[in-house]
Structures are given as C-alpha cells and as structure tokens.
Amino acid sequence: MRRAIWWMTTALAVVAVGGSAYAWGRQQQLNGQAMATMVNAQFDGALHNALADMESLRGALASAMLVADPVSFDRHLSDVAKFAYAGENDLSRLPSNISADHNMNEFLHTVDSQVEHWMISNQNPGAASVQQALTSYYNRAGNVISGLERIVNAPRTTASFWTDGRQLAPAARDGLARLEQSLGTMVSDASIHSSATSGKSKVASPILIQSTDAVKRVEAAAGVDKTAEWKAQLHTTGENAPYYVVSGDTKRGSVRAEVSATTGKLISYHLTRPIGVAKYDFAQAATDAQAWLAHQGYHQVVRADAGNTDGIARFAYQPMISGLPVLDSSFNVVVALDNGQVIGFYEQGKLPPTSLPKVTKALPANALRAKLGPKFHMQSERKVIVENPNGNWVQAMAYEGVLGDEPYRVIIDLQTGHELRVDRLG
C-alpha cells in the first residue's frame, strides 16, 4: 500500500513538473512569436519607408531637370536633399547584417551633399554637368526603386513568419546585396532652399439662398414640375459649404442634387433611372450638354474631353476666364443616349472669380521657354489660368512634353517666370 502511494505521488510530481515545463516553454514560444513579429514589422516598415522616400526622391529629381528658373530649381533641389536624407535614415533602421553595405548609402549621401553644394554655389540649372548628374541620379533612383519593390513584395509564409524574428532578413539581405552590386560607386549632386507659401484662411461664405429657392433650381435642372416629395437639407461644413442637398422622386426618376446656399448655383446633379438602348446622336448629345450647362449659368466653357460607354455619354468642359481655360477645374455632364436626357452633372476643382486682373507685364515667349530644362522636350504649349501656391489666380503657360519617355507638364507664371508646379501626366 505504501509503495503504491509512493509511486502515485512520484507520478503526480512528474506530471506537475512536466506541465510547468510545458507551460513555461509555451510562454517562451509565445514571447518569441511576439518579439519576432515586432522585429519583422520594424524591418518591413523601414523598407516600405525607404521605397516611398526613393519614389519621392526620383520625382524631385525629375522636377529639377524640367526647369531652368534658379528659384524653382533651388526649391526642387531642396526636396531632393530632404528625401535623400530621409532614405538614409530609413536604411539605418535595418539591422547591420542586412542593411545596405555602402553603395546605396553612398548614393544617397552623394546626392544630398552635391545638392547642398549646388545650392550654396548658386549653380546654373542649365549647366551640362548639372543636367548630366541629375540624369544619372534619376536613373539610379529608378534602379533602387525597382530593387526595393522586389524586396518589399517578396512572398512570405505565415507559418514560418515568427520562428526566429528574421524571416525578412535573408530576402532583404540578398535583395540589397544585388542592389548594391548594380549600383556600383558614384559621385553626387546638390540643394537646399524651401520657399514658404502663405496660407490664406478661408472665410465662411454667407447663406443667401433659402431651401425653397434651392428646390426650384433642381426642378429647373430636372425639367419637372413642382414635386411634393422634395427634401432640402442645409450643410454648413465640408467642401462647397454652405450648400443644400435636395432629393426627391419625379416622373423621370429619383433625383439627388447639391445647390450652393451662397450663389444658388447647381454643384452636382444625379438622376437615377433605367437606361434604354442607345440611339441618340453623340454629337447632338455634346451640343445638348453644353446648352444645358448654359442654362445652369455656366456660359463660358470649352470642351476638354468626351467619351461614351454602356449607352451613357460623358463630357468634360473647362471654364473660361478672360478667354483662357482654367487648368484644374471642369464641369462634367452625363447624358443618357437612349433619349438625350441629362442624367448627371458635377464640378471638379476650384473655380476662380469670374474676372481677374489684367497681366501688366508678361515675359516674352522666348524668356518663358528658357525657364525649361534642357532635358525636357516640349511638344505643346498653351496659356491657362491656374492657382499659385499663395492661393492667387494667375495667368500661366502650360508646357507639355517628355523627359526621356515619361510625359510631364510644367506650369510657369506668365509675369514672374517662376515655375508654379510640375505635373506627371498619364
């Protein structure tokens, strides 16, 4: 009996010790999982940030190549330096066993230092040596982006993600090693200058239109008689505020529209109904769309785009001020091609005042074109209205062309000759 009790006690002790050991081991495993997940997240975040900064760096380099105006050039060089420095910091967050050895860091440091030198020495943006260096940096940045994308997008197995907290390390180490080899050694670039822009505080617009007037505006747009089901709700926050949202069911379909509570103009309009077989002439639909816009108070417009799908035509019109198109604004009209009825309308972008001060002293055409970088192959130019960084509407020249095989648009102020912005097209 005593022997049986002794064996039973011993067995229970073994079970207890084994259970404790298992619990301790399981806890250690869970701790390891948590630590590994945290470490992998750190590696992953650093690589994602490095990729984002390299993409921004390449964009800033492209902008610097597209302009010849010293002030604009300095501003873009400042961005180049900022993103090069940020990229160096991102790579420094990787553990020493997988971080780039020296070529990538040298590339970023070289770009940062060279840009700073150009800024201090007021280097001519059109100088052949400057353009050659910018082109080299631009191409190398593209190579780095491709390499980082392959690393960031490499597949990872969930089952082994946590095992040693370093699943990302082999892929990152091998990928960065290949990237290092492709980069080779290099020399650098320069810039630091940031132009401050004064932000204008937006003053709240007054409410001058009653809800009944907003309903009448929508009735006129829909071409229907008074409907008892109309609802109008005032909104005082958000874009276009204050405005009314007007909705109701009509004999033509369900209508939802937005009307400015300040000007009474239609901001958006949508008629929901089944669309029949397309039989309405597309050219006539375009004429009708512009006439419909005129009825809404938008008389000075020029058609910028048109298309049709699934029996519905869409037309985009740019507003005209003093005979010039407003670059970033458009009125979009949607027409059903079963009977030519307008079933949609919306604005895009900000609208300038209906009249602007005259340009007192515009720079000659040759002087404006001289602001473009030598690597930029201009294909077209046109005079436009655009909002400058200070929030003022100005006349500008929009130059479209290519840098290598990538399409860009450079916008230059007509009076000051300053580059207002660079847009990548397509």
Image (cartoon, rainbow, N blue to C red):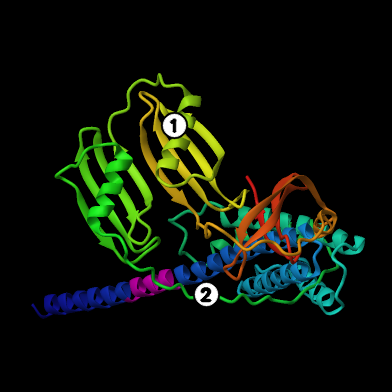
Q: Give the residues in magenta.
A: 24-35
Q: Nearer the viewer, residue 377 or 211?
A: 211
- The answer to whether residue 207 is visible is yes
Residue 200's tag is 2
Observer-nearest residue: 207 or 239?
Answer: 207
- Binning the other alpha carbons within 10 Å of mark 2 as few (below 14), some (14 to 19) or many (20 upward) gives few
- Please report whichever mark, 2 or 1, sits nearer to the chain's N-terminal start: 2
In front here: 191 or 48? 191
Secondary structure beneath disc 2? loop
Which element type, helix, strand or loop, lies under badge 1? helix
> Where is residue 284 shown, x and y percent of the image?
47, 25
In the shown orientation, is residue 109 left or right of residue 324? right
Q: Please report the residue visible at 86 percent of the width from the left and 67 percent of the height from the top.
A: 187
Q: Residue at x 17, y 42 (%)?
A: 227
The image shows residue 188, relative to residue 292, as above or below, that is below
Q: Is residue 120 left or right of residue 414?
A: right
Q: Residues within 10 Å of mark 1 (few under 14, many from 20)?
A: some
Between residues 238 and 14, which one lies in front from this camera angle? 238
> In this view, which residue lies farthest toward the right?
128
Is 27 a magenta residue? yes
Q: Position of residue 75 (x, y in %)?
A: 72, 71
Quadrant, the N terminus: bottom left
Corner quadrant of residue 370: bottom right
User: Which of the labelled discs sits on residue 288, or is there none?
Assistant: 1
Q: Do the residues under discs 2 and 1 have CB atoms within 8 angstroms?
A: no
- Closest to the camera, between mark 2 and mark 1, is 1
- Three-letter amino acid code at disc 2? Lys
Locate residue 119, reporting x and y percent: 81, 76
